[in-house]
Image (spheres, rainbow, N blue to C red):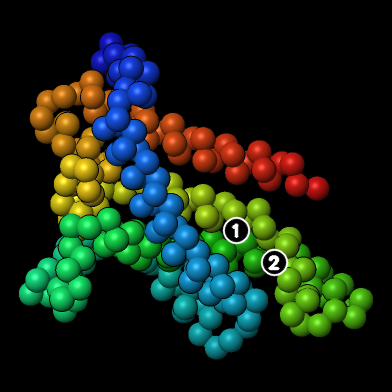
Amino acid sequence: MWEILEGIRRVIELFGNPVVLETTFRSIYVSGTATLLSALLGIPLGVLIGFKDFTGKHFVKAIFNALLGIPTVALGLILYLVFSHSGFLGFLDLLYTPMVIMFGQAILITPIMISLVVHAVESVDPDVRDLARTLGASETEASIAVLRESTAGVALAFVSCFNRAIAELGVAIAVGGNIRGLTRVLTTTIALEVMRGEIEYSIAMAVMLLLIVFVVTLAINLIQRRRP
């Protein structure tokens, strides 16, 4: 208990530490970019799957649901083999860079994005689309009406994916290498400091990570509550 309290005290002290702030902002930047990349593919694809009825739809949804639990260490190993100098994409020289961490995190969270968006779209009352059509809306306009009703679910998907990305460790440490000043993020810092025996410092970083997740989630909830 004392170590936790001491960790919280260290967080307050470390707020002005340049290294801590750099690591924190890098974590937000990397995971935020990965979430945006995931959203560019995941939201349109999730909306399309949610809107359309087609043969094999349940099978497609089952595949994305199965990918929700992909081990981050396994994904990190695969990406390492692909981007290493002897790998298929080794010529890009992206290993141990923030970019490859973004790419790996985007792969990790895209199935989550798609599954949650599909669920959000399918949860909208079917009468919304039927009413829009009755009022003379085109198929596209009716789809937009449904999408507006599922905005809260889509926002939840985005936040959930960001929280998942910023909290993952396997990809960041496997392809990032935990290089100080370049690829070190909050989760890899926590793992490193625990191995060094710097428990108070690792607790401070963990509290910082939890604070980011809490603030982002709270902000989205407040925005949703203010919507008419």
Q: Kindly identify the amino acid type of the residue bearing the numbered disc 2.
A: Leu
Question: At 55% across and 88% down in the image, what residue appears?
Answer: 55
Question: Where is residue 178 shown, x and y percent of the image?
Answer: 18, 47
Question: At 35% across and 38% down in the image, what residue appears?
Answer: 24
Residue farthest toward the bottom in the current orientation of the protein: 55
Q: Which labelled disc corresponds to residue 154?
A: 1
Residue farthest toward the front in the current orientation of the protein: 18
Q: Do the residues bearing badges 1 and 2 touch, measured as CB atoms within 8 Å? A: yes
- Label 1: few (<14), some or many (≥20) within 10 Å? many
Q: Image height check: is 218 above or below 171?
A: above
Q: Kindly identify the amino acid type of the residue bearing the numbered disc 1.
A: Val
Question: Where is residue 50 shown, x and y percent of the image?
Answer: 61, 73
Residue farthest toward the left in the current orientation of the protein: 86
Quadrant position of the N terminus in the picture: top left
Question: At 18% across and 42% down in the image, what residue appears?
Answer: 180
- Label 2: few (<14), some or many (≥20) within 10 Å? many
Q: Image height check: is 217 above or below 176?
A: above
Residue farthest toward the right in the current orientation of the protein: 135
The residue at which mark 2 appears reads as 147
Secondary-structure class at tag 1 = helix
